[in-house]
Image (cartoon, helix red, strand yellow):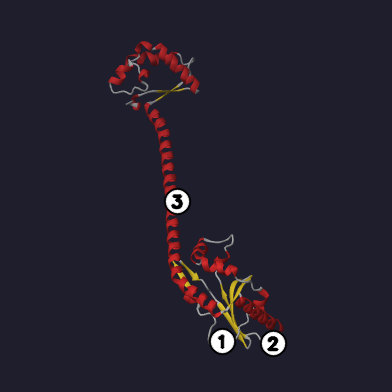
Amino acid sequence: MIDFHQSLGLRLASETDAYTLEKILHRTFRLASVDPIEVVASGGSADGASEWFSTSCLPRLLQYLKDNQDLHPHVTISGGELVALLERPIQRSQAGIAREKFKKEKEAHRNERVSELIAFRHSQLEGLRASLKVVHPKIAQELERQKQNGNIVGICDTSMGSYLVIAETVPVPSGDLLWGLKPLSTHYDYPRGGGSIMSSFSQMTWAEGTISKVELPRAHLRDDSVSETDEVIYEVFREEFEWFNKLQRIPEEWISAIFPHGLFLTPSSDDHHSKRAIENVMAALSKARCR
C-alpha cells in the first residue's frame, strides 16, 4: 500500500505534459526500476508493478526535476495535499454511491407501494365479487317474479341513467309496491367501497294502473368508460344484463311525463302529456305480454 503522506506529487499544466514527463523519467531512471516480480513478491499488485523504482534514485530524481524545471514546468505537491486530492474523488464517488442507493431505495419503496396497492385492489374486487354473489339471487328471484306476473315493460335509457320499467294494468293497493326489493336489500360492500345494484325506484298509481321505474347500475351499459368495479358487476349479473339488452326500449319522454323531475306528488292522469304517456306504457306492456 502506498503511504501518500510520505510521498511527493507533481502538478503539471496538462495531462499531455504529465504523460510526457512520466515517459522521460521512466527512460532516464530505467536502471533504478524494480523488477515487477519483486514488487508482486513483496505484496504489491501486479497491476502497475512495472511503475516502481528503487528509493536509491530519489535524490537524483529530485535534482533532475529541479535542474529541468524550465523544460518540465511543474509544482511539487506534499503528501498531505496528495491525500486530500485523492480523497476528494473518493468522497464524490461515495456521494454518487449514496445517491444511487437512495434512488434504488426510493424505487424499491415505490414498487412496494404499487404492489401493495395492486394487492389491495385485488382484495377489493374479490370482496366485491363475494358480496355481489350474495345479492344476485335476490335480484334474479325478483326479476323472475316480475316476468311470471307479466309486469316487465322494457328499458328506458335517459340522460339521468337507465331504468327497468314495470307496470300493472290495475292499481296496486295503497302502501304496496310493484317492485318487491328495497334498495338496501340490493346493497353490496367491499373494503372501502359499496353501493346498490338497484339504487332507487319510483312508483305512480292511477285508475289506469300502476307504473314503476327501477334504476339500473351503469355497468349494464358496457360502455367504453367501464371501471373495474363495473366489470365485476357485469360479470356477476351478465345473464340479467344481456336479457335487459333484449327488452324493448321505452322512450325517455314517456317516463319523464309520468315521473316529472322534482315532483313528489302523483301527476294527474288528466294531464294530456302524462295521460298519453301512461297509455303508451300500458300499450307497451300489452305488447311485451304478447311476446
Residue 20 visible in image: yes
Give the residue pinned by disc 3.
Answer: 110
Q: Is residue 206 above or below residue 288?
A: below
Residue at image coords 54%, 80%: 149
Judged by depth in the image, the label closer to the viewer, 1 or 2, is: 1
Residue 100 in the figure: left or right of residue 44: right
Q: Position of residue 109 (x, y in %)?
A: 42, 50
Q: CA distance from mark 1 to mark 2?
A: 19 Å
In the rendering, at what x and y percent does residue 212 appear? 58, 80
**Amino acid bearing label 3:** Arg
Say whether disc 2 or disc 3 marks the residue closer to the N-terminus.
Answer: 3
Give the residue furthest to the right.
272
Residue at image mark 1: 172
- Picture quadrant where residue 52 is located: top left
What secondary structure is marked by label 1?
Answer: loop
Q: Give the alpha-carbon distance from disc 2 to disc 3, as whole Å.
A: 66 Å
On residue 270, the disc is 2
